[in-house]
Image (cartoon, rainbow, N blue to C red):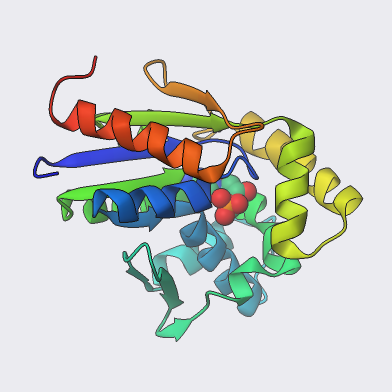
Amino acid sequence: MEQRCVVAIDGPSGSGKSTVSRRLAVALDAAYLDTGAMYRALTWAVLRDGVDLSDPEAVTKVAVEAELTLTPDPREPHIAVDGRWVDEPIRSPEVTGAVSAVASVPTVRRLLVAQQREIIAGADRIVVEGRDIGTVVAPEAELKVFLTADQEERARRRSAETATDHVTTAADLARRDELDSTRAADPLQQAEDAVELDTTGMTIDEVVSTLQELALSRASGTGQ
Ligand code: DC
């Protein structure tokens, strides 16, 4: 694909966003941006500094000072905070438990959205995954996708990924969905012109090839 193409992939936790976004980026020979990893990395820095999660000003100060570095390679995406690679620690239960609080601070979102837009502007083709990509970060994206899957299937996928038991995972997903969908600043929301894809019962290959076809037709201007 020669044309510039931004693909925005939003959806709740466990909808298959990360696996699908990375595979789609490889298929399209595009860069990959995991915006959830940016919120997680800042949360890691907030916990590192022992900052009170319920103090938005202190949390914002960490966001202003922390330097995030991302490698946009979908085969090997990495993220560093202040020069330290944090790919593993940002997936810890501590970070997962605290990230919704950090992501609900409007000033933190403004800072990260600005960085995300800069990364997108610097890429020819890019697949961006998150919660507010089609609505806030890149509303001009050629293709916006809203991935869903039923609660049971999402909990099953997450619990296989994280080796955490099903009941705990299901409760954590429900809690985060509620927080992410009801926060005042840029909640998880489907863009009006997004393609909604329910991945329940679909294989990853099926989802990726469906989206690849859509992206190719949008980029060449043959899609609607
Ligand atoms: O996709 P994930 O589970 O790694 O995202 C971690 C958290 O970050 C999730 O609880 C919601 C938040 N998030 C957000 O608010 N906006 C984004 N664009 C991406 C993630």
- The relative height of residue 73 versus residue 207 in the rendered view (above or below) is below
Look at 77% across and 55% down and name the residue there.
159
In the rendered view, does 46 fall on the left or right side of 122?
right
Look at 61% across and 40% down and name the residue there.
15
Look at 22% across and 34% down and name the residue there.
216
Residue 108 coordinates in the image, percent (x, y): 47, 53
In the rendered view, does 222 fall on the left or right side of 92?
left
Residue lying furthest left: 2
Q: Is residue 107 visible?
A: no
Q: How many marks?
A: 0
Q: Is residue 161 visible?
A: yes
Q: Quadrant of the C terminus?
A: top left
In the rendered view, does 73 fall on the left or right side of 52?
left
In the rendered view, does 48 fall on the left or right side of 108?
right
Q: Quadrant of the N terminus?
A: top left
Residue 138 coordinates in the image, percent (x, y): 30, 36
Residue 96 coordinates in the image, percent (x, y): 69, 60
Residue 103 coordinates in the image, percent (x, y): 56, 49
**Depth order, front residue of 174/159:** 159
